[in-house]
Image: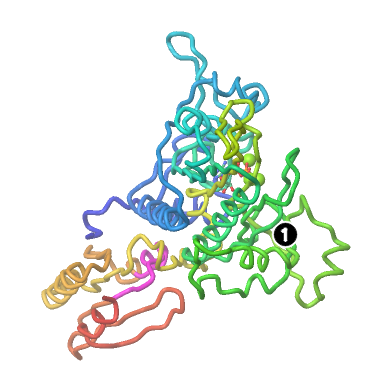
Amino acid sequence: MRLSNYFMPTLKETPTEAQIVSHRLMLRAGMVRQASAGIYSWLPLGLRVLRKIEQIVREEQDRAGAQEVLMPTIQSADLWRESGRYDDYGKEMLRIVDRHNRDMLYGPTNEELITEIFRNSVKSYRDLPKNLYHIQWKFRDEVRPRFGVMRGREFLMKDAYSFDLDYDSAKTSYNKMFVAYLRTYARMGLKAIPMAADTGPIGGDLSHEFIILADTGESAIFCHNDYLESDVLAKDADYGGDLQAIVDSWTKLYAATDEKHDQAAFEAEVPEDKRVERRGIEVGHIFYFGDKYSKPLGAEVVTPDGKQAPVLMGSYGIGVSRLVGGIIEASHDENGIIWPESVAPYKVGLINLRAGDADCVNACDGAYASLNAAGVEVLYDDRDLGAGAKFAGMDLIGLPWQLVIGPRGLKNGVVELKNRKSGEREELTLNAAINKLA
Ligand code: ATP
Ligand code: MG
Ligand code: MG
Ligand code: MG
């Protein structure tokens, strides 16, 4: 993509309405614009990041055996009356009346709808287990939408729903999602720590929030430092095998948000030099809730001994749009965003230092063509602008690599390659630079 053509309305000034760094940087980099409180339009640069995050989530869900569906954003109130949640959900639910005076709603979550789909089609234990997920916009009329896409009212969520015959198999389904979540966040360059969460009236120990550390996080977190140092992707996950050992390794050390925190236990279990007390952002939440919805909604199957039983369910959410802000909170410096390569909108920013110079234009156009041919995503600053503005702009949008081509270097047969994260610069021939990036 050539910047001269690209719709990337960057801002020089820091927007005053933005309280946290990710919100400021997303506005400044031209990634999103607010449409109304907590509701955002995604511009080209922001949308590319959103899509990359979504794709990593999708790949890891698929790998763990979940199957993608797509449910609508608008749901009928009838189902929610069946589950009893229509009145319970309260003001966070956006209620709509259609022209025939039917009560509808903009889905804040999808347990009811997926249970209905399931109960209409699955009748036998032989069809279990199943895990269905979708990646869809949700609406929650948050009292205080804030922090940009981190607490929006309309936001993109992946939610998966598992269906099992008995507790053991439900636990296996839960473990698969647990491990898939660890992998998903690690692939985005994040350290997300599973923390025990409230299970409400169901009880048991099967609910975890996945939390990333950031000073602007809304909850206080307390955990063992070893969790920050584990390398999740070092070993492949075998979803056909027993995942309990992995889950145990991530649940045996202390890790809790303020809701569940027990200072005495923290001090007893974690040596002082290993105690981490920080703030964190909830980027995912997995939950086993048994027959909470299948019972009232009548989602039953025939069991091996010929009886009828409600299926046992779990749900598994990831805040896809929240992650865009979350990743920036975890990875930026005073000059702008630092994208991990896996979610970067482009891998390389190509900078022509002298737009009016024929040699520079030739070399840059050639590099642009070669990188594109090699399948490298490149954003080419071909505009007639000063070097300072180009460098600042590239640092702001945070692409992992900057390939800088100018008249002085070309005379000596070299270009400059800068790593955004480390700040390291290297002079090398254009060919060597292209080979390194491809
Ligand atoms: P929170 O505690 O932040 O309000 P939640 O516990 O209400 O979140 P869940 O119902 O567990 O959210 O939804 C699953 C995931 O969806 C959350 O872990 C979070 O990442 C994301 N999410 C929830 N609410 C929002 C929101 N208002 N804006 C963006 N993402 C959200
Ligand atoms: Mg909430
Ligand atoms: Mg929460
Ligand atoms: Mg939650």
Residue at x 80%, y 56% (from the top left corner):
261
Figure coloring: rainbow
Category of crowding for the residue at label 1, using alpha-carbon neighbours closer than 10 angstroms: few (below 14), some (14–19), many (at least 20): many
**Residue 191 placed where, x, y %?**
58, 66
Residue 395 on the magenta segment: yes
> Is 334 in front, or is 88?
88
Work out whether 228 lies above or below 171.
Answer: below
**Residue 412 placed where, x, y %?**
20, 91
Residue 285, can we see it?
Answer: no
Query: What residue would you read off at disc 1?
Result: 221
Give left or right: position of 260 versus 77: right
Work out whether 105 lies above or below 370.
Answer: above
Label 1: which secondary element: strand
* Stretch of the chain drawn in magenta: 391-403
Amino acid carrying label 1: it is Ile
Residue at x 52%, y 59% (from the top left corner):
180
Give left or right: position of 313 versus 425: right
Residue 42 on the magenta segment: no
**Residue 47 placed where, x, y %?**
37, 50
Residue at x 23%, y 59% (from the top left corner):
1
